[in-house]
Image (cartoon, rainbow, N blue to C red):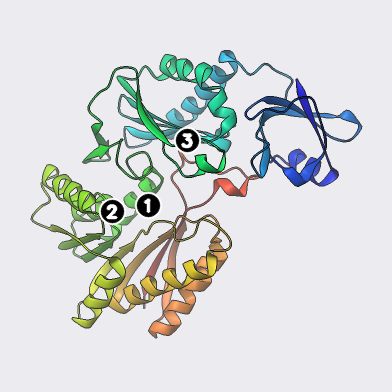
Amino acid sequence: MASVVLRRRGQLRVLRGHPWIYQADVEQTDGALGKGDLVDVYGTGRRFLGRGYINPDSQILVRLLTRDAEPINAAFFRRRIAAAMDYRQRLAIPSNAIRMVYAEADALPGLLLDCYGDIGVIQILTAGMERLRGVLLPVIQELIHPHGTYLRNDAPSRLLEGLTVEKEFVGTPFDPVVNIQEDDLYFQVNIATGQKTGFFLDQRANRLAVRPLAADRQVLDCFCYTGGFALHAAKAGAQRVEGIDNSAEAVAAATENAKRNHLSDRCAFRRGNAFDELRQLQGAGRRFDLIILDPPAFTKSKEALPGALRGYKEINLRAMKLLNTGGILVTSSCSYHLSEATFLQMLEDAATDAKIQCRILAIRTQAPDHPVLLSVPETKYLKCVFLERL
């Protein structure tokens, strides 16, 4: 097996628990290094540090799979995926739509596995995991016994790994529109065309946390997608819920989900650009008691952060101006490159410009089936802040 020897800086990061090894961390390499090949990693004095896969075309040269000198085979994946499934079972998640494997957080870098009832949706994000697909897929089939399996290998990060983007059924095709339950609500999810793998599973706990705040409120849900936050608010007793999304497909799905849950009398969804809609609502003198902002990631890199911050500040400033006294803003960012501290500072600046005072009711993150590793800050990306206007 080919090997990689690390410089001191890279060795220290690995010893502290991080699974990534950058090109600049490497002192020397031995043997042929093909894209996706398994390699052993050593520190100073040929100290064995772990085994992973390599991609010479990526800035992240090696991603560690194990700290032991063990074979990476079907038995290895069986143990890892079974452990991930056991952890989710202990969480007692109030839904049958669950992230079963979350990449580095489950010691399986480059692999995502979501279960929507008896349907499995897989994303393979790296060249190393792609090379192991033939071993990996049968193990997943064996452990989750899905009615059907779908590959959502359309994440842009695959291009950075030199991989093609693709979407395909594993085995016999089936209807990609599936039904799921979240607490006492029912949603249709299109696993082939929906965002991420079809639904924003990472916001589940935050949607449930909105419910105690929604009774008798006038609610505005921007970037509403298929109605997750909106329907939880309506189910909890909101007087009226308006949802806005730029996607006609999402608006149609949200409308259908409201009908399915017998909430159409209190929910109205429309297509629109959230920035424009917030400006128009302010001009019309509208006011709300609960506003939800769950935008897509405005930044995919550090270089794009200044522009992203301007976008975040604008939508939050306009939302704050629409809040009644005592109203609540639930605002999120799923951009890893925007830190929690910077996000809170942006909210403070927006409140200052809006000439209002807010207090923090909660600072939340992604649902527990998207666990965060203490030694891998990249596994924590979602910020969700609950603010009350005083």
Q: Which residue is drawn at 23% across and 50% down?
A: 250
Residue type (three-letter) at the residue carrying disc 1: Asn
Could you tell me if the residues under marks 1 and 2 are in contact, i.e. CB atoms within 8 Å? Answer: yes
* Residue 118 point in image, percent of width and height: 31, 24
Q: Can residue 19 be seen in this view?
A: no
Residue 164, numbered label: 3
Tag 3 secondary structure: loop
Q: In which quarter of the image is the N terminus?
A: top right
Residue denoted by label 1? 206
For the residue pair 346 and 280, the one nearer the viewer reads as 280
Residue denoted by label 2? 229
Query: Which badge, 1 or 3, comes first in the chain's sequence?
Result: 3
Could you tell me if the residues under marks 1 and 3 are in contact, i.e. CB atoms within 8 Å? Answer: no
Q: Distance between the residues labelled 2 and 3?
A: 34 Å
Q: In this view, does 206 lie above or below 120?
A: below
Q: How crowded is mark 3: few (under 14 residues within 10 Å), some or many (20 or more)?
A: few
Q: How many marks?
A: 3
Left/right placement of residue 300 relative to residue 28 reads left
* Residue 374 point in image, percent of width and height: 63, 45
For the residue pair 327 and 12, the one nearer the viewer reads as 12
Q: Residue at x 54, y 49 (%)?
A: 380
Query: Which badge, 2 or 3, comes first in the chain's sequence?
Result: 3
Q: Which residue is drawn at 61% across and 49% down?
A: 377
* Residue 285 point in image, percent of width and height: 20, 82
Q: Quadrant of residue 379?
A: top right
Q: Is residue 182 above or below residue 327?
A: above
Q: Is residue 377 visible?
A: yes
Q: Nearer the viewer, mark 2 or mark 3?
A: 3
* Residue 80 point in image, percent of width and height: 56, 23
